[in-house]
Amino acid sequence: MPEGKIIKALSGFYYVLDGEDLIQCRGRGVFRKRNITPLVGDYVEYEAENDKEGYILSIGDRKNELVRPPISNIDQAVLVFSALEPTFSTMLLDRFLVLIESKNVEPVICVTKMDLVEDSKGLQAFMEDYRTIGYTVVETSSEKMEGLVALEDYLAGKTSVFAGQSGVGKSSLLNAIRPELELKTDEISSSLGRGKHTTRHVELIPLSGGLVADTPGFSSLDFDGIEVEDLSDCFPEMAERSAACKFRGCIHLNEPKCAVKQAVEKDEIPSYRYDHYLQFIEEIKERKPRY
């Protein structure tokens, strides 16, 4: 049975790359009955009616998957955040990071539109915080073509998903690296104060010796599937200190001799990261149970 990899999903069709052949496939009805949706990134077996059309018969095991954006089997997530327009948000970045960490996917933080910042001291301080935690942070400007080579080095040989808020410049960034892509871009909506959605589907694109996915932008994340006791594992600087807490299973709220709270008091953990952690804890507690 021929095998391939889904590189695009659009309007109920799945485009399977098998060598140099691209087969437009539909999913068998059995997937709907089992509530399984083929994802971009899936390795599949398919049956071809001809050299252009076919049906997906089975989906291979996934090493990971994301819901928004819907993609599987990725090596890293490039989280694209703009310095301005829209303004850099540590709260939103931490939401993305928690989701990515919960899926055991390696994150790369990419800050775009650095050319728009006149005084970057405050922003640089934030970026240094994330570097100290252990995250990779790349500063770029599509307008001035800065930082693109450094970003390409991280893309080489890997399957990467580009994700971030609408209007931060994901498509512009990919166009700057590879102009022939001609991905559609748009400006920030003046009435809404946020980006207009320009990318309408997920598609894997060969780039820099790897594959990258340009995805629809989105501006909110929930924490479905993440429990209160697991949240600190999604904050690396907390996870590495948890073993030093007095009580096993410490969730770093009101427990005495908590190593995480002590680190916050000593400014070893940024206070805003801990504040976000507390807010996320409340959101998870308030989450309505599903029946």
Image (spheres, grey):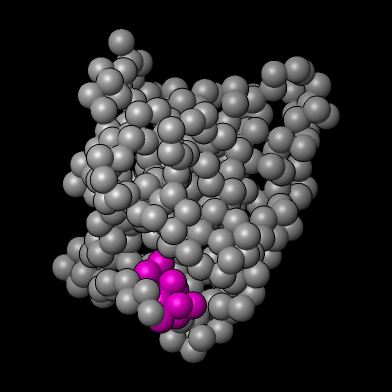
Left of 216 or right of it: where is 285?
Answer: right
* Residue drawn at (58%, 31%) of the image: 231
Say if 124 sits above or below 74 in the image. below
Say if 174 sits above or below 9 in the image. below
Q: Residue furthest left?
A: 191
Q: Position of residue 81 (x, y in %)?
A: 46, 64
* Residue drawn at (21%, 41%) of the image: 12
Q: Does residue 178 show up?
A: yes
Say if 228 sits above or below 135 in the image. above
Image label count: 0
Quarter of image, res 251: top right
Task: Using the image as rendered, state which of residue 61 and residue 1 is in the foreground.
Answer: 1
Q: Residue furthest bottom?
A: 144
Dividing the image into 4 quarters, which one contains the N terminus? top left
* Residue drawn at (40%, 81%) of the image: 179
Q: Position of residue 89 (x, y in %)?
A: 46, 59
Main SS, magenta residues: helix
> Magenta span has 266?
no
* Residue drawn at (41%, 67%) of the image: 170
Q: Residue furthest top?
A: 291
Q: Does residue 279 show up?
A: no
Dividing the image into 4 quarters, which one contains the C terminus? top left
Say if 77 sits above or below 242 in the image. below
Magenta-colored span: 169-179
Quarter of image, res 105: top right
Task: Using the image as rendered, state which of residue 270 and residue 71 is in the foreground.
Answer: 71
